[in-house]
Image (tube, rainbow, N blue to C red):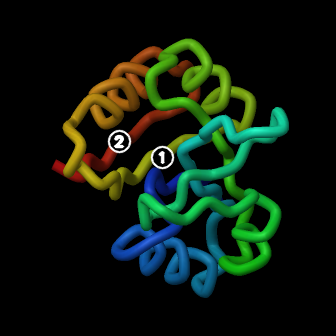
Amino acid sequence: MSVITVAGGTGGLGRAIVDALISEGKHTTFVLGREVYTPGNRYTNYISDHHLLQTSESKEKEIGNRILALNYSDIDTLVAILETNKIEVVISTLNLIQGAGAEHTLIQATAKSSVTKRYIPSI
């Protein structure tokens, strides 16, 4: 059983992949979600629609999977998340409308991770 994470797995194509992995039941699955700071010292996931913010707990309940909220600009934190959760495969379905920076950082973190063996890019 592999441990797989889907970056951008809360919407569109990523959500379809997460749903398929969950229904197959052969792998441990996580979703990587963008973390943003909101008033009141509260972190929430930045969900696909740029105007919609939901807490990870409510979104996790909706999709039936654990969301790992993170900052895609911090390579060392990404590496720590991949290694702590023993993530072997990263599937990227990141929205690249705002550029490929997050994808590039995720590729670098995957390369540095001692446990991640496969990266499937969205580009």
- Number of numbered discs overlaid on the protein picture: 2
- Circle 2 sits in a helix, a strand or a loop, which is it? strand
Mark linked to residue 119:
2
Q: Amino acid at mark 1?
A: Val
Task: Sort mark 2 into few (<14), some (14-19) or many (20+) by Cα contacts within 10 Å.
Answer: some
For marks 2 and 1, the one nearer the N-term is 1
Residue 7 falls left or right of residue 32: left
Please tell me which residue is depicted at 55% across the width and 19% down the height of the picture.
114
Percent coordinates x, y for residue 115 in the rendering: 57, 28
Q: What's the distance in space between the residues labelled 2 and 1, CA to CA?
A: 6 Å
Residue nearer the viewer, 56 or 23: 56
Residue 5 position within the rendered picture, expressed as x and y whole percent measured from the top left: 54, 52
| Residue drawn 50% across the image and 33% down it | 116
Most extreme residue toward the left is: 123
The residue closer to the viewer here, 108 or 46, is: 46
The quadrant in which residue 82 appears is: top right
Q: Give the position of the N terminus as an image quadrant.
A: bottom right
Looking at the rendered structure, the secondary structure element under dot 1 is strand
Q: Image quarter for residue 93? A: bottom left
Residue 65 numbered mark, or none: none
Compared with residue 26, is residue 4 higher up or lower down, i.e. above or below? Answer: above
In the visual, does 90 lie left or right of 121? Answer: right
Give the crowd class for mark 1: few <14, some 14-19, many >=20 residues within 10 Å.
many
Residue under numbered circle 1: 89
Q: Amino acid at mark 2?
A: Tyr
Write the residue at 56% across / 50% down: 33
Measuring from the top left, give residue 72's x and y in whole percent: 47, 30
Instruction: Judge whether 17 appears above or below 108 on screen.
Output: below
Q: Which one is in front, 17 or 77?
A: 77
Cβ atoms under marks 2 and 1 closer than 8 Å: yes
